[in-house]
């Protein structure tokens, strides 16, 4: 009995619906790449995964000394300044690491992209997931610090996952845009570190956004990370933290815009990646 002949056609899905089905079909590849990135990040390091704790901790120490002790900027209520800073460092470190890793993820996997088809969105998404793992590891320091200071969160802490999802959407949306730009314009490999550094200065990481004059608060919230960081502090610090709701809504609108635009532009340019990478 003659064997049946099969023809395999390697091409992207012809519709968005098929594309999202492809993402599910290639979920094992997603798991493999995410696990690979986690292992590679700390391979041949002296203290391994502890770097996920050391980096945000040292950032917190520097900002606490500069803004809290030297500049003597106010905290929020009775919140220790170190906890205020670390509550801002957590989402920012996640966002910054996601942009840095995802922007170069396709270029770093050029051989894989040029040889076989799979939804390219998997690669930058795994970079964001890897940064999310670091985020949860760093979160353990926040818990230890709160125990050290005897500072306990209120019921708002149960809403923290909502702001984690918002931070994830911001990281993935902007990350997809920068990934697509970096593939087409290699100059972006130099632009991304500048954007991350500049964003640190204009985001309320080392200080409370309440020091911004009221008439400028809404304009300041055009930086989407302002709403994300304020949301983290509102959830973690409890009653001592106040939230500027018009600014939060503006930041959330911008996060949603970047998330949708990032996916749309990435999907639009995805078919050209194998040719230009």
Image: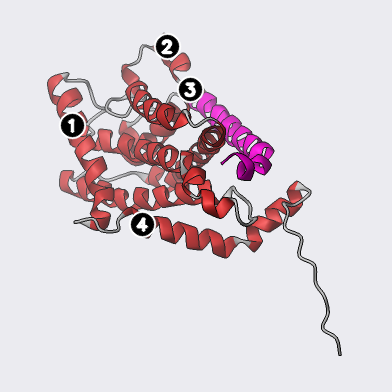
How far apart in space, not on screen, are marks 1 and 4 (Cα)?
Answer: 28 Å
- Asked if the stretch drawn in magenta spans residue 253, the answer is yes
Which image quarter is the C terminus in?
Answer: top right
* Nearest to N terminus: mark 2 or mark 1: 1
Q: Which residue occupies 43% across, 61% down?
A: 35
Of residues 270 and 243, the one drawn nearer to the viewer in this rendering: 270
Q: Nearer the viewer, mark 2 or mark 4?
A: 4
Is the Cβ of the residue at disc 1 closer than 8 Å to that at disc 4? no
Count neighbours of disc 2 (C-alpha within 10 A) and say few if under 14, some if 14 to 19, many if 20 or more. few
Task: Determine the image quadrant of residue 211.
Answer: top left
Residue 264 at x, y = what percent?
66, 36
Q: Nearer the viewer, mark 2 or mark 1?
A: 1
* Nearest to N terminus: mark 1 or mark 3: 1
Q: Which mark is residue 40?
A: 4
**Pointer 1 residue:** 62
* Nearest to N terminus: mark 4 or mark 3: 4
Q: Which residue occupies 50% across, 37% down?
A: 175
Of residues 211 and 181, the one drawn nearer to the viewer in this rendering: 181
Which image quarter is the N terminus in?
Answer: bottom right
Q: Which residue occupies 75% across, 54% down?
A: 18
Magenta residue span: 248-277
Predominant SS along the magenta part: helix
Mark 2 secondary-structure assignment:
helix
Mark 1 secondary-structure assignment:
helix
**Pointer 2 residue:** 216
**Pointer 3 residue:** 247
Count neighbours of disc 1 (C-alpha within 10 A) and say few if under 14, some if 14 to 19, many if 20 or more. some
- Asked if the stretch drawn in magenta spans residue 214, the answer is no
Q: Which residue occupies 60% across, 55% down?
A: 115
Is the Cβ of the residue at disc 2 closer than 8 Å to that at disc 4? no
Q: Is residue 99 above or below residue 116?
A: above
Q: How are the residues colored?
A: secondary structure
């Amino acid at each position: 009995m003659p064997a049946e002949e099969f023809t395999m056609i390697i091409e992207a899905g012809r519709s968005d619906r098929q594309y999202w089905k492809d993402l599910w079909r290639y979920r094992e590849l997603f798991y493999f790449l995410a696990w690979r990135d986690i292992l590679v990040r700390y391979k041949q390091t002296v203290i391994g995964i502890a770097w996920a704790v050391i980096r945000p901790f040292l950032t917190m120490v520097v900002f606490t000394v500069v803004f809290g002790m030297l500049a003597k900027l106010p905290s929020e209520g009775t919140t220790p300044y170190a906890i205020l800073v670390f509550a801002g460092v957590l989402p920012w470190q996640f966002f910054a690491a996601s942009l840095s890793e995802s922007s170069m993820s396709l270029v770093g996997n050029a051989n894989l992209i040029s040889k076989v088809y799979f939804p390219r969105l998997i690669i930058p998404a795994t970079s964001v997931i890897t940064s999310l793992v670091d985020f949860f590891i760093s979160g353990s320091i926040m818990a230890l610090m709160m125990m050290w200071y005897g500072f306990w969160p209120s019921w708002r802490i149960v809403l923290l996952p909502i702001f984690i999802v918002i931070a994830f959407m911001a990281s993935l949306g902007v990350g997809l845009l920068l990934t697509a730009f970096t593939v087409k314009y290699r100059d972006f490999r130099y632009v991304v570190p500048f954007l991350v550094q500049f964003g640190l200065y204009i985001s309320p990481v080392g200080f409370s956004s309440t020091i911004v004059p009221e008439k400028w608060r809404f304009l300041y919230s055009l930086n989407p990370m302002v709403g994300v960081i304020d949301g983290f502090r509102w959830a973690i610090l409890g009653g001592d933290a106040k939230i500027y709701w018009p600014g939060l809504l503006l930041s959330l609108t911008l996060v949603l815009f970047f998330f949708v635009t990032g996916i749309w532009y990435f999907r639009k340019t995805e078919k050209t990646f194998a040719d230009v990478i």
